Image (spheres, rainbow, N blue to C red):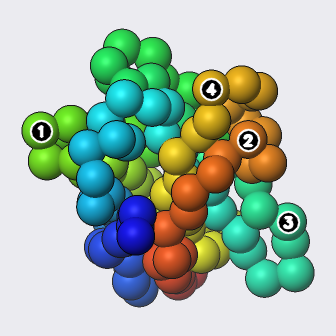
Amino acid sequence: QVQLVESGGGLVQAGGSLRLSCTASTRTFSYVLMGWFRQAPGKERSFVAAISWSGNNRYYADSVKGRFTISRDNAKNTLYLQMNSLKPKDTAVYYCAAKSKTGSYYDATRYYYWGQGNQVTVSS
């Protein structure tokens, strides 16, 4: 069964950093656009960042631009999200996902495989 396994979440103080990882069980994901989404309590899942299969194109939500960096290592089947200058409003469950060939990178309905989710909590 195809899986995306996330790691790296946790509790950090405002201004701190965390790095999330998402490892795929198959090399299939090395050839697709991958993204990160997050969902805060009582809110809908929202787009955070996405990266093309080659890594040449990266996309960010305005709320994280300049603070978060998405990257990938296809040799390791792994996607990363480096989060710096974290703020309490970044507190959420973070999900990695693999996107289908059609639709917009910011549209969660266009992603067909999802990780299990990883809690990130930023204290003030």
Q: Which callout, 1 or 3, points at the residue further toward the start of the chain?
A: 3
Front tag of 3 and 2 = 2
Front position among marks 1 and 3: 1
Q: Mark 2 or mark 1: name the one nearer the start of the chain.
A: 1
- Amino acid type at circle 3 is Glu
Element class at badge 3: loop
Is 82 situated above or below 117? above
From the viewer's perspective, is residue 65 above or below residue 39? above
Give amino acid for label 2.
Arg
- Which residue is farthest left? 75
Tag shown at residue 44: 3
Q: Position of residue 15 (x, y in %)?
A: 42, 63
Upstream in sequence: badge 2 or badge 4: 4
Q: Amino acid at mark 4?
A: Lys
Residue visible at 79% across and 48% down?
A: 109
In the displayed structure image, the side of residue 82 where residue 59 appears, left or right? right
Question: Residue placed farthest to the top in the image?
Answer: 56
Which quarter of the figure has residue 105?
A: top right
Q: Disc 2 versus disc 4: distance between alpha carbons?
A: 8 Å
Q: Residue under label 2, please give it.
A: 110
* Residue on which the image places disc 1: 75
Res 110 quadrant in image: top right
Residue located beneath label 4 in the image: 101
Q: Residues within 10 Å of mark 1 (few under 14, many from 20)?
A: few
Is the C-beta separation of discs 4 and 1 under 8 Å? Answer: no
Q: CA distance from mark 4 to mark 3?
A: 23 Å
Instruction: Please tell me whether mark 1 sits on a helix, a strand or a loop.
Output: helix
Tell which tag, 4 or 1, sits nearer the viewer: 4
